[in-house]
Amino acid sequence: MTCHEIREQLPEFVSGGLPVEGRRGIGAHIEACPACAEEARTLRLLRSTRPQAPVGLEARIRSAVHADLAASPPGVLRLEPRRSAPRVPRWMIATAALLALAVGTPLIVDSMRETTSIDGTELARVEDGLVTSSWARDDGLVAGAPALDELSDEALLALLAQMEAGA
């Protein structure tokens, strides 16, 4: 076993809650591993300094429970009912979410249409202002590199001259 596995079982080992076979393996490891031995010593110290229940507390609790049982009708234990919030079935939550989505989506889409409407002439003016040369066209590619593969040598020279001229 690894030190990590041993340390996970040390609290049960120190309290005596492990079976004999498990105790032997952990005991052998603790004798050979100083770090795990120190961990076991610390746990024993913590266990020995924990607060103890007052003397007779268990007997007082048992007698109070027996007195309560004796005062109750046969077969009935008096307990105060727990008050909890009513539980909503999961299917109701899912249905409400779907309904909100079904109603909300068209409203959002309609509001988006109103704020982003551009007519065709305005769009053409914007595109004309942006596209001044064959190099600046928006072909969706980085620096137009794949688009240059299809150009002839003459077209590449013309493009180079256009770029040098600053057009």
Image (cartoon, rainbow, N blue to C red):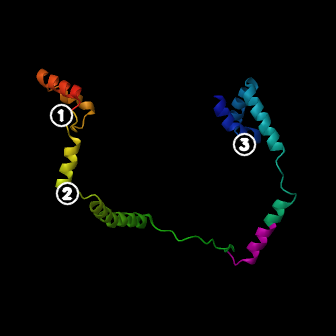
Q: Which amino acid does label 3 sit on?
A: Gly
In the picture shown, does residue 54 fall above or below 82? above
Report how far apart the C-alphas of labels 1 and 2 lie in the structure: 25 Å
Kindly state the secondary structure of the residue where label 1 is placed: loop
- Give the left or right position of residue 56, taking residue 164 as reference: right
Residue occupying the point 80% across, 42% down? 46
Which of pointers 2 and 3 indicates the residue nearer the eye? 2
Instruction: Tell me where residue 113 appears, x and y as whole percent.
Output: 27, 61
Decide: is 106 above or below 142. Answer: below
Query: CA–CA distance between discs 2 and 3?
Result: 79 Å
In the rendered image, which residue does mark 1 sit on? 134
For the stretch drawn in magenta, the main secondary structure is helix
Q: Which of marks 1 and 2 is nearer the N terminus?
A: 2
Q: Is residue 73 magenta?
A: yes
Placement of the N terminus among the 4 image quadrants: top right
In the rendered image, residue 9, in percent from the top left (x then y), is placed at 68, 37
Name the front one of labels 3 and 1.
1
Image quarter of the C terminus:
top left
The residue wearing badge 2 is 119
Horizontal and vertical percent position of residue 41: 79, 34
> Residue 87: x percent and y percent?
51, 68
Mark 3 or mark 1: whose residue is earlier in sequence: 3
- Where disc 3 sits, the SS reads loop
Label 2 sits on what residue type?
Asp
List the single residue furthest toward the front. Answer: 165
Seen at 35% across and 63% down, the residue is: 101
Name which quarter of the figure residue 30 lies in.
top right
Ranked by sequence position, the earlier of labels 2 and 3 is 3
Q: Residue 17 carries which label?
A: 3
The image quadrant that residue 115 belongs to is bottom left
Q: Give the range drawn in magenta.
A: 63-74
Depth check, front residue: 146 or 66: 146
